[in-house]
Image (cartoon, grey):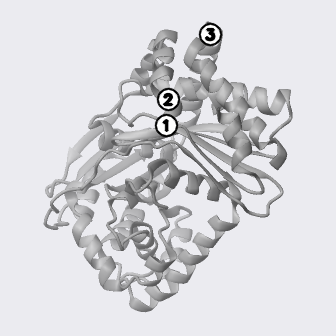
Amino acid sequence: MYRKLVLTNGLRVVAERIPTLKSVTVGLWVNVGSRDERAGEEGLSHFLEHMFFKGTKTRSATRISREIDALGGELNAFTTRETTTFYVKVLDQQLKPALALLSDLFHHSRFDPKEVEKEKQVVLEEIRMVEDDPEDLVQELHQAQMLKRHPLGRPILGKPTTIQGLRRDHLLRYVQAHYHPRQIVIAVAGNFDLTVLVPLLEASFGSFQRPASPGMDRWPSQVSGGLMVRRKLLEQAHVSMGLKGLALGHKDRYAAHMLNSVLGGNVSSRLFQEVREKRGLAYSIYSYLSAFSDGGTITIYAATRPREAGRVVGLVCKEIRRLRTAGVGRMELERAKNQMKGSLMLSLESSHSRMSKLAKDELYLGRHQSLEEILAEIDHVSGEQVLRLSRELFDFSCLSVVALGPVSAASLQSSIN
């Protein structure tokens, strides 16, 4: 059972009751992320997410941790390029104290200057972790290469120099600018009584007021082609390749998922079979879609022996060209549809994943999309639609390639051509 309501302050609530579950997840989604940061604010959205857990007027950080453990639940948050999300997942009978805890964090976090200084070191360690993980690092470098100076191309974690310069007043100004009711969606999924839930949410969030900001200064990104190599002493060459994708609400989004599934989205995909299974050139090779409110990308990642990097890039280009000219076969398309439907249904077996879907539907589509509607959309995708889309997206003038490791740019360039 799906319901949508608006609290007295304009904050939207989307809820789905699933009585067969014993859990309930409440997510508070703020429509602001790393792409909304201005120069000098890089990483502020993510840093602020950390700081909400560092103590309120009545609870210390330690007490917050102990309270959620005592409830047997999970309290956490994450930042993306377009949203910042705080969520709590508990057994259904623990909904009231869980909401009280989430509400206290959101409304009464202190952002103590001493905690700000300590958390800077934590986030700087997080940035160093990315630098030490070649798979993460090459894809971060690739995002910047593809999208150039667009805010979507910046690391969510920010830059060390910016993090080191943050102060409490920066956090407060950012909250004032972006955290207001009409920019927030609360999504609830699991086993709950709506007549109990609504008064709890109204009491916890309905009186929250803040003047609306002028609005997000967002503009669509453009995917740029090119080749970049960062030499680093590694056992493998890590390669990330990218092309244009689609926005989250685009009418062809399900065809794009099919295209990705056939290319490298699963173990029966062309790239997995050609590169790993037939030739043994890589242990890890896959593709994925990154979709935003106004655009997107498709990315292919592979790790291989440095001397084989050019060969792997060539095989990827070959499969992309083959999809552009011949599209997908009937059996291949049916397999992709079944895989996509199965993956969707399995992913929605938890209250957390249902909560995420509710929020994204509201933020990006402006309406709830039922599972039946999604399954019908998947079944409706045709081979002709996938072929047309592959010719639109797989434009080699926009092909961006980034490699990390002991590999030469010349060997990769010859494989692309």
* Label 3 CA crowd tier, 10 Å (few <14, some 14–19, many 20+): few
Q: CA distance from mark 3 to mark 2?
A: 21 Å
- Mark 3 lies on residue: 329
Q: Total number of numbered labels?
A: 3
Instruction: Name the residue carrying label 2.
Output: 395
Q: Say which mark, if any, is on residue 398.
A: 1
Among the two numbered marks 3 and 2 on one chain, the one whose residue lies closer to the N terminus: 3
Q: Is any atom of residue 244 visible in this view?
A: yes
Secondary structure of residue under mark 2: loop
State left or right for residue 52 relative to residue 74: left
Asked which quadrant contains residue 184, the reply is: bottom left
Mark 1, Cα crowd under 10 Å, few <14 / some 14-19 / many 20+, is some
At 44% from the left and 24% from the top, the residue drawn is: 392
Query: Mark 1 and mark 2 in contact (Cβ < 8 Å)?
Result: yes
Question: Where in the figure is residue 293, as x and y percent of width and height?
Answer: 34, 42
Q: State the image quarter where residue 405 is shown.
A: bottom right
If the image is split into quadrants, where does the C terminus sit? top right
Q: Are marks 3 and 1 in contact (CB under 8 Å)?
A: no
* Residue 119, above or below 370: below
Q: Look at label 3 and name its amino acid.
A: Gly
Residue 305: in sight, yes or no? Answer: no
